[in-house]
Image: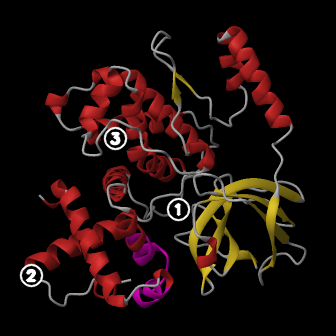
Amino acid sequence: MALSLPRMLPVSTTDGELIQRAAGGDRSAFELLYQRYARPVFGLALRRLGDRGRAEDAVQETFASIWRSAGTYKPDRGPGAPWLYAVARNAIVDRARNRTEIPADIPDEPSHDAGPAEQAEQGWVSWRVHRALEELNEREREVVSLAYWSGLSQSEVAEFLGIPLGTVKTRTRAALARLAEILGDEFE
Amino acid sequence: MSFDDIVGTEGLSREEEATLRRVHELLVAAGPPPDLSPDLSLPPVPAEESDPPEVAFLLRRRRGRVAVLALAAALAAFVGGYAFGHSKGKPAAFTSIRMVAMHGAADAPAESHGVINIAEKDSVGNWPMLVEVSGLPEQAKQSSYYELWLTHNGKAVAPCGSFRVHGKTTRVRLSVPYALKNFDGWVVTTQGPDQNGLGPVVLTT
């Protein structure tokens, strides 16, 4: 279901400004934050919890926490994205702790799965990238999604979208360049 | 798929190539953003400013908590709770304008099949669907589920929602915003934590 864009707030409004507005009870700001971060939060929760139902609950809890604690955000301590990430991570960790699992047997061999530090790093990368994708216009997001995750070749993407292959390549490069701008600090 | 396949290097300066290559690596590392279920299509509704600073989960499907909210909000919530409960017991009528039959894929149980009922596109451009599947085995793990996809040239390209099954027949309501005429079929795959990418197809048109 498509969301209608909250009115009166320019899309250039920073995350930090939105959090501050939400702290003052501005629902439009809260809705815009949700639009920007629902998918990254859900992705993070899904990665950590491995269960869609529990991940959906974690999304709800995360945004409940954001609404409740927006007043504790201090813009002089940094931008909004890391603060939101911390709130989401805490909500998800709380939910993971509540999980009742039968203790697993100790494996015979060491696991090759990512350790906590690697998982945290991976979670942050996904968070930033998924958030950045929300900033692309629809045509750019569409071509990136098809190129990277549909399994279609670029020629098949061109056929699917009904546009020349050269346009697909140009649009893909433009989208990646835009993502590079948005993800600026990932390149430092 | 490699950087050369997707982006290519022709006409790029060394600096531009390095920048795009870094973004490419980040996209590959991040993986696809998950599709949001209808339950997450709208944000939770914040309580009135005069209320305590808490969030009312009016859109949640989880059982039990709606009743707590109803108790807290007296008559208005009673009416809302009644309406909510009533609507749960009797789902709104679903008027199908198109039905798509699905049959079991090669590795699926012989008796498995499904029907996708598609209703008129709504005012904001979504196609409501009532999906009915039968004969699919229940999920092996709590975190496993089935995913419905639209296909193009036989490849699953557009996720349409995920669901779990219980018993012989399961009905779920999903909604997709895509231009359906751009696709040529549907498949259902099994998905789970052990799968990286698309899982095995169990139903197909």
Q: Splitting the image into 4 quarters, where does residue B71 fall?
A: top right
Kindly check if marks 2 and 3 are in contact, taking CB atoms under 8 A apart as contact.
no
Q: Chain of mark 2?
A: B
Task: Give me the chain letter of mark 1.
Answer: A
Confirm whether residue A162 shows in the render.
Answer: yes
Disc 2 packing (10 Å; few <14; some 14–19; many ≥20)? few
Under mark 3, the amino acid is Tyr
For the point 30% across and 20% down, the residue is A71
- The nearer-to-camera label among 1 and 2 is 2
Residue at x-position 61% and y-position 43% = B39
Secondary structure beneath dot 2 equals helix
B55 relative to A93, above or below:
above
Left or right position of B135 against A28: right
Circle 3 sits on which residue? A85
Residue A169: x and y in percent read 30, 83
Residue at point 26% right, 26% down?
A: A73
Q: Earlier in the sequence, mark 3 or mark 1?
A: 3
